[in-house]
Image (cartoon, rainbow, N blue to C red):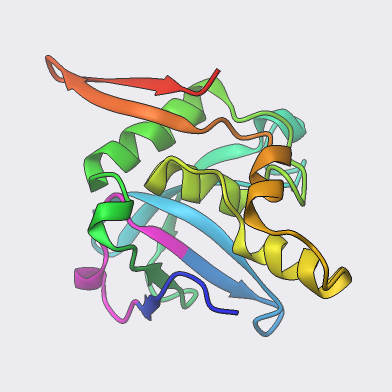
Amino acid sequence: MGGIPSKPVKSLRDLQPGDHIKYHRFKGVYAHHAIVVSVEAPNYTVIHFSGDKDEGKGSELCIRKVTLNFGEESFKVLEYPSEHRFKKEETVAIAFYFLEHGVGNYKLFSNNCEHFATTCATGYPCSIQTLRAAIAANPYFIGIPVLIAYCNTKKVVSIKNVRGQFVIKFEE
């Protein structure tokens, strides 16, 4: 099963604020996802959502902004078709909104780092990894609509720049 195409990031010139990136963990068994919010050589800053309670103040507040040194770890940028994603500055605004307001409790199958990053980039809370795991566990699994229905991350309905401030509306 495919996913969103991605390309390796070989230099900071390949990275922009608003990019959805993924780091492979445990030899590619799973990936950790984040949103790039700034790039200033030799560093880049991401906002990410983690299930690691030591990283935040409890599972509800494990969304963090961190600055990383480029080259410490390899990662890829997801290449969404432009018609299926928000503009990069909108993606950054949504990530900062979630940083300030939270995204709820971390749940491996219904509210994880990939749900967070895909919501910031596309408005839709989706995790291809979760879908793959569900299909592997049950080949008769009915797919993405069911995963979205059980997802705890709110869908972004619209985002508009009003006099320099982004106004974000979520599905009720």
Q: Residue at x 33, y 68 (%)?
A: 79
On the image, the x and y values in percent for residue 68 come to 44, 59
Judge whether 94 appears above or below 147 on screen: above
On the image, the x and y values in percent for residue 161 come to 18, 23
Relative horizontal placement of residue 148, taking residue 69 as reference (left or right):
right
Q: Residue at x 55, y 39 (%)?
A: 64
On the image, the x and y values in percent for residue 9 come to 34, 77
Q: Which residues are magenta?
A: 9-21
Relative horizontal placement of residue 167, taking residue 164 as reference (left or right):
right
Q: Residue at x 34, y 63 (%)?
A: 80
- Residue projecting furthest to the left: 163
In front of the other: 117 or 155:
155
Which is the main secondary structure of the residues drawn in magenta? loop
Judge whether 80 appears above or below 114 on screen: below
In front of the other: 132 or 66:
132
On the image, the x and y values in percent for residue 69 come to 40, 64
Image quadrant containing the C terminus: top right
